[in-house]
Amino acid sequence: MNYAFFKFKFRTAVHFGGGTLNSTNSCFLADTLFSALYLEAMKLNLHEKLYSLVSGSQLCFSDSFPYMGGVYYLPKPMKNIENSKQGDSKEKKLLKKIKYLPCDKIDDFLKSRLDLMALAHKFCDFSEDTKVTIRQEDAIQGPYRVGVCTFLDNCGLYVIVGYENQEAFELAKVLFEALQYSGIGGKRTSGYGKFAVEIDTKSEAVKKLIERNSDMYMTLAVSLPEAEELSSAIAGSSYLLIKRSGFVMSDNYAREQRRKQDMFVFAAGSCFTSRFKGGILNVAGDDGLHPVYRYAVPMFIGV
């Protein structure tokens, strides 16, 4: 498998669901990305090809993570790290605050060789925008607040794209280039989530982490083992479960907007004693007119 960094250079503020409309996260997850790419693929009649390549393990995606200049960050492993300052309360608070590590410093972190103070970087600012809803049928206007995230200069998000062959890489390029005009995240009709995509194929440091054998493996994407994998996946592991839900965005799914089936998945940064395959799950309701897919395929690095 080959890997490339697809960088999102945002031209606008973004809104990535934070539980309430007036809050936002700073990153989007792999299942959100797959859904957005699938909608772009449907416009280009490439959705069956996308599904075939992903389900056949020829194309895969990580969650989004921050970059700063030429430095790419990965989630902090959910793994107990022994260090000489373990009883220092300031050190504990700082360790809890840090969410991301430079990808070429993962091993130093695992061996307690890093100065944590030097890792407390700021990538973005959070704020609220005021918007107005206009209901045309009765001319009622109502102001509401939207939580937005704005990235600092020389900062943005990237995803790791794994591709087995040139066909998979070219499809990813086409879909990401289309997505940059539609945008990603919530409230895109209000102008949020627009970006320019840039591709960096110099991913040797991450490729080494992905391909190496280890006694623990950290997932870089929201994921869920298949039923027969579950018991072995969670044995001796350290993980966080998060709820994934949301609405179906397809206009052809039903007459009225419907919710996807809720799912609980392992968050990026979760660590496992063995790799698992995961998959793409149908989260459509019983009365939907077509399948609705939830991406739950892990991308592991050895930690």
Image (cartoon, rainbow, N blue to C red):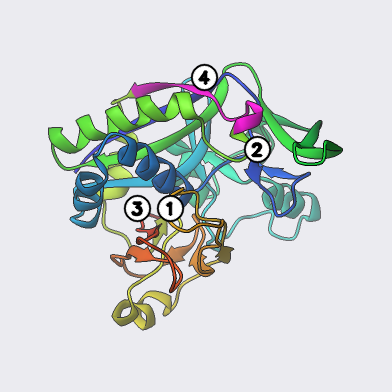
Q: What is the three-letter code of the residue carrying label 4? A: Gly
Q: Is residue 134 above or below residue 80?
A: above
Q: Specify few, some or many for label 1: CA neighbours under 10 Å numbering under 14, 14-19, or 20 or more.
A: many
Q: Is residue 117 above or below residue 20?
A: above
Tell me the SS state at disc 1: loop
First reached walking from the N terminus: tag 3 or tag 4: 4
Q: Which residue is mark 2?
A: 15
First reached walking from the N terminus: tag 1 or tag 2: 2
Q: Which residue is mark 1?
A: 221
Q: Inspect the magenta stretch and tell me whether residue 195 lies in it.
A: yes
Q: What is the three-letter code of the residue carrying label 3? A: Met
Q: What is the three-letter code of the residue carrying label 1? A: Ala
Residue 283 lies, in percent from the top left, at: 43, 66
First reached walking from the N terminus: tag 2 or tag 4: 2
| Rendering quarter of residue 46 | top left
Residue 265 lies, in percent from the top left, at: 49, 66
Instruction: Name the residue at 63% across, 16% down.
Output: 153
Q: Answer yes or no: do the residues labelled 3 and 2 have beta carbons within 8 Å?
A: no
* Of labels 1 and 4, the one closer to you: 1
Q: Which residue is mark 4?
A: 69
Q: Specify few, some or many for label 3: CA neighbours under 10 Å numbering under 14, 14-19, or 20 or more.
A: many
How far is mark 3 from mark 2, CA to CA? 25 Å
First reached walking from the N terminus: tag 1 or tag 4: 4
- Residues drawn in magenta: 189-199
Tell me the SS state at disc 2: loop
Along the line of sight, which residue is nearer the eye, 203 or 134? 134
How far is mark 1 from mark 4, CA to CA? 23 Å
* Of labels 3 and 2, the one closer to you: 2
Residue 84 lies, in percent from the top left, at: 64, 55
Q: Answer yes or no: do the residues labelled 3 and 1 have beta carbons within 8 Å?
A: yes
Q: Is residue 3 left or right of residue 245?
A: left
